[in-house]
Image (cartoon, grey):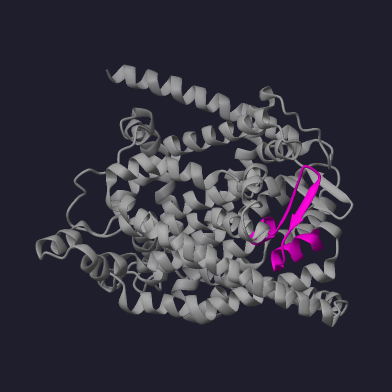
Amino acid sequence: MYHWLWLRDLILGGSFLFLLCAWLVLAASRWAAPLTPVVAISLSPLALPLYAGYSLLRMLLAYGLALLFTLLYGHVAATNRQAEHVMIPLLDLLQSIPILSFLPAVVLALVAAFPQSNIGLELASILLIFTSQAWNMTFSFYHSVLTLPRDLVDVCRLLRLRPWQRFLKLELAASIIGLVWNSMMSWAGGWFFLMASEQFSLGDRSFQLPGLGSYLQLAADRGDPRALTLGLLTLIGLIVLLDVCLWRPLVAWAERFKLEEQAETIPPHSLVLDLLRGSPTARWLWKHLGQPLGEGLAWLLNRLQPLPGDRFTHPSTVEQARQDRLLHWALRSAGMLFLGLLVLLVLWISWQGGLLLMQVPPVTWGRLVLAAGATWLRTLIALAIGTLWTVPIGVAIGLSPRWSRRLQPLVQIAASIPATALFPALLALLVALPGSLSLAAILLMLLGTQWYVLFNVIAGAMAIPRDLLEAAALFGVTGWRRWRTVILPAIFPYLVTGLITASGGAWNASIVSELVQFHGQTLHTFGLGAEIAAAAGTGNYPVLLAGTLLMAALVVLFNRLVWRRLYQLAERRYRLA
């Protein structure tokens, strides 16, 4: 039996490594090829596996970048109160800037940086996907750290854990459930904007990358139902594959970090996780590679973050102390240099932006303000509709492991299908309704934002300790009283995170919802999203910058006046401590 397990690992691991190497070689050849701004997209079914591989690699690289950003940015913002006053408003601002607004600058800058290859275009696509993935993950991690149970924080202080130990053993562990579900939402958001991230139109210039998004865009433009169906089926196949091989194992593994004393009666299950846990190859790699690397990394971090009384700070190790001081001085100098360069860059960008804004006439500013009001109303309506159905459904899924296993892949599929690929069919139905494209824009914004609330509510419901639910049942707390005293307070921090990211997503989705192009026709309704999309398409950079700044200002103002106060309420009253 033991030899059979090794043979199984050899077959599965060898096949995986072969496919991975072939995939990376094809992608590398594409990246290193001479710059081709426009490529011929084939609608042949035989091209779909290659296009799907290209898109999946871009998504993986963007997610890796988003995860690194989340852990670093969220940790600093939640643990340093001085930095928090700058970093959280900046995060609000970054979330509020629509993709199409900085797309021209990103694409042109990266293409100019890599004029001899496709690396610039690929990096531009990855960065644009990153912007659709990072913000909700960062807000989720930040709020999980902010609402840590006080008794666990006190235990870490009594055990004298170093900052890196506190990060791994408490902050990351306590935020795993929300981070996993927001990671799934980030992937869904990345798939939603995949079509926009693989095709760029900047005035009279166009750039294109081979991928699943370009395939779906071309199929939608030509009105080819066969190609569109095949593309969507390929996308759904990728989503199901990722669910089986990645998200379901992570959901099952994250159950161990739930804050409760009694284990789940029917814990989440994953065949892939069971294979990894029973794999002799995985155990051997962990023992001979993972543990030594972890011990070496722990030794290095202990040197960088010594505690009083450590042997690294003992008077006899004078040379080591001198080396540590030099290392800290070098790191501090590098940080100051980076900060200075960043300040100079911000000043230069502000100067250039001011010159562009001076070209916008007062009449245009008035039109943009009115358009912003129209988009704001659509955003509120979309958020209200999304919250009304996602809260009860999300709680039902999160509290039932059986329904969670059944509906998790279906929710991911529904959230990941780009609404832009369904525009031809949707608009044919929606435009005929009262309100024309204005109503259609609300529904299209809803399709792109409701999932942020749903995924966070599911994560919040799954994080409710089973002991708390059983205590409520023991005391006869049922019906609306159970919702009011147990469920809603427990999911409130997650709900706020979902609403704030959904709000930013709704403003972003307005750009592709208020101005739609397909079959050679352009349909638009009055709104700030339509103004920004039109300015980006015609290369009207002064109006594009003005609309972007106005949208960012409104989002940040709403976050400061509403969402930030709800965050403070969640931190003060609705934490498990």
Q: Position of residue 223 (x, y in %)?
A: 72, 36
Q: From what the image shows, is residue 245 above or below residue 389?
A: above
Residue 520 falls in image quadrant: top right
Name the residue: 42% across, 35% down: 244
Q: Quadrant of the C terminus?
A: bottom left
Name the residue: 31% across, 73% down: 574
Q: Which residues are magenta?
A: 509-536
Number of marks in picture: 0
Out of 75 and 2, give the one closest to the viewer: 75
| Residue 532 on the magenta segment | yes
Q: Position of residue 188 (x, y in %)?
A: 53, 48
Residue 175 falls in image quadrant: bottom left
Q: Quadrant of the N terminus?
A: top left
Q: From what the image shows, is residue 226 above or below residue 142?
A: above
Name the residue: 58% across, 53% down: 65
Q: Is residue 455 left or right of residue 257?
A: right
Name the residue: 54% across, 69% down: 380
| Residue 187 on the magenta segment | no
Q: Position of residue 271 (x, y in %)?
A: 34, 32
Out of 36 and 459, give the one closest to the viewer: 459
Q: Is residue 42 left or right of residue 54?
A: right
Out of 15 and 577, give the one closest to the viewer: 577
Q: Is residue 122 visible?
A: yes
Q: From what the image shows, is residue 264 above or below residue 322?
A: above
Q: Position of residue 438 (x, y in %)?
A: 65, 61
Residue 250 falls in image quadrant: top left
Q: Is residue 50 visible?
A: no
